[in-house]
Amino acid sequence: MLVLGIETSCDETAAALVADGKDILSNIVATQFDLLKKYGGVVPEIAARRHTELIGYTVEEALDKAGKTLDDVEAVAVSSMQGLIGCLMVGVAAAKSISYARGLPLIGVHHVEGHIFANRLSNPDLPFPHVCLTVSGGHTLLLYVKEESSYELLGTTLDDAAGEAFDKTAKFLGILYADRNTGGGRAIDELSRKGDRLAFNFPRPMLRNKTYDFSFSGLKTSVINMFKDRIAAGKKLPLADIAASFQEAVVDVLVVKTLRAADEYGMKAVSVTGGVSANSRLRSAFEDACAAKGVAVYFPSLSLCTDNAAMIAAAGHARLMRGEVSGLRLNVVPNSPLEGLDERDIN
Amino acid sequence: MIVLGIDTSGYTNAVGIVDGDKVLADFAYEAKTDSLQRIVADIDATLKEAGLALSDVEGIGVGLGPGSWTGIRVGVTVGKMLAFASGKPVCGVPTLEVLAFTARDGSRPICSIIKVGAGDAVYAACYHPEGDFLDRIGDYYVGDVKGLTGMLTGSTVLAGKDVKEYARVIRKESGTNVKAVEAAPGGAVVACLAAQRFARGEKDDVLSLTPLYLKESTAKAFVNKYKRGHA
Ligand SMILES: [Zn+2]
């Protein structure tokens, strides 16, 4: 079963071909970096215009790279839930048109479910049930995954997403790369390797809170305040130490809460996905903590951490195998809960 | 040649089918926020009602706007990806030209007007009819209605929605003799104008086809203004 995946929920125009929900034949991501740099972030109208320009080329490139034609494609899966509304609409309009013109089943996919399936693509042996932490610039969710596509929300962020905290802090510290579309997370990750993660003791928000919810905006503020205090006092600004200490605080909260959930639910497996799961310190901290507790931890390969369409094809394939197909009236839902997807959102 | 025409650029969503100069179907309804939800299903229903399948269609015409930015993205993406997936030629048709074609009145020049979102600004363009063809005179216009008077040469037809009000303003402003003709973008007219271009051996590049926004997005306009201010 060859599935064409399409993803345009934020600032990446992406298309991919995935066979049987597991073999990635192509995974094309056209980034909007040149525009992001100019405007210092994602401007929804500009991103949506760019998707409209790039969508055809991206789909064609995905077919070419895989050495396939539309004749070989058997279904079309598209991010239709969670993201910027105008951006989602371009992908859904494209997917619907291809599905209609070729008489192929259409499957609307929740973008975050795509991130969860990215880990299945990288680790086919990922067991169920497990606890899943999915973290990006747009979301921070801790989930109990009973079985494939069955999610119970344990906690989420009350303010900024973890990736958003990385982006904003990197921007404040002025350490974003001028020439690479790596985002704040990567910049902090790389700078942190040269720094002392114990140099500053930033707060660990919500760490002792009994819930599984997160909060990152206060942490970002305390970095900013400390930065300003040091400037006022004429002290040096060891950027690498600040970055490493900030990163350590975020990682600490994510690891401790995830493992507490694994413990409470008696889970022996943890899955970490989303853009922030590419962070090297997050990976090593999870590996150490999980090894100490005898819990297995799984990460997607680096190319599947950030937004891509292979993960959407994989998630769509699973839904299709269960007989869940969307109709030509499929609409976009910018804010949709992952657990207990409403049938109206899928159809 | 059987041509499918669609337009979701603004206050009307439209699907039409023509075969040569015969209109096989022409379906339009007031657009709300459901263009994305409806358009492909509407294309399917319109084809079926005409006793056709998409495989019978030999070319696709799509209204490029200007109009609602979201609306034209939906229409253009559907038009080009239908063409891409079915291997048929596609032709983008400016929605202002569609309005002008609908409101033709002999050899009188036509000025098509589309309101820009909220506020007083309009998109406009002037056309000269040459038989069944339209020649655009001058550039596209974005600005207030009063500013249009400089573009109008003699007795002109104003085409579009709510043009009676625009005609009143223009008569008062410049004394120009204008005639208001209410017109909405129709699918069959989009198809017909695309068919004209196909007949001349023209078509658009499927992958690079993009909407006719005529206005930069606010963020971009802001950045440009900022640059100018600090030049
Ligand atoms: Zn994402």
Image (cartoon, coloured by chain):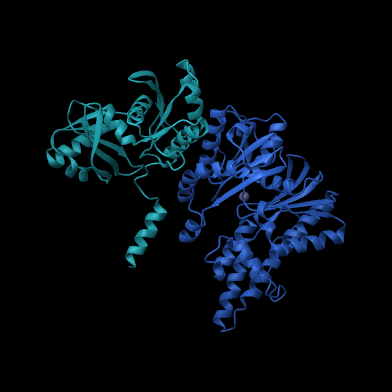
Chain colours: A blue, B cyan
In the picture as drawn, the residue positioned furthest to the right comes out as A294
Residue at x 37%, y 50% (from the top left corner)? B216
Q: Report how many numbered discs are placed on residues in the image.
A: 0
* Observer able to see residue A253: yes
Q: Which of B178 and B78 is in front in this view?
A: B78
Query: Could you say which quadrant of the image residue A102 lies in?
Result: top right
- Residue B14 % position (x, y): 40, 27
In the picture as drawn, the residue positioned furthest to the bottom comes out as A234
Q: In this view, does B63 lie above or below B223?
A: above
- Residue A347 % position (x, y): 61, 30
Q: In this view, does B54 lie to the left or right of A270?
A: left
- Residue A151 % position (x, y): 73, 42
Query: Could you say which quadrant of the image residue A158 lies in?
Result: bottom right
Q: Which of A200 and A301 is in front in this view?
A: A301
Q: Which of A328 and B195 is in front in this view?
A: B195
Q: Is residue B221 left or right of residue A246?
A: left
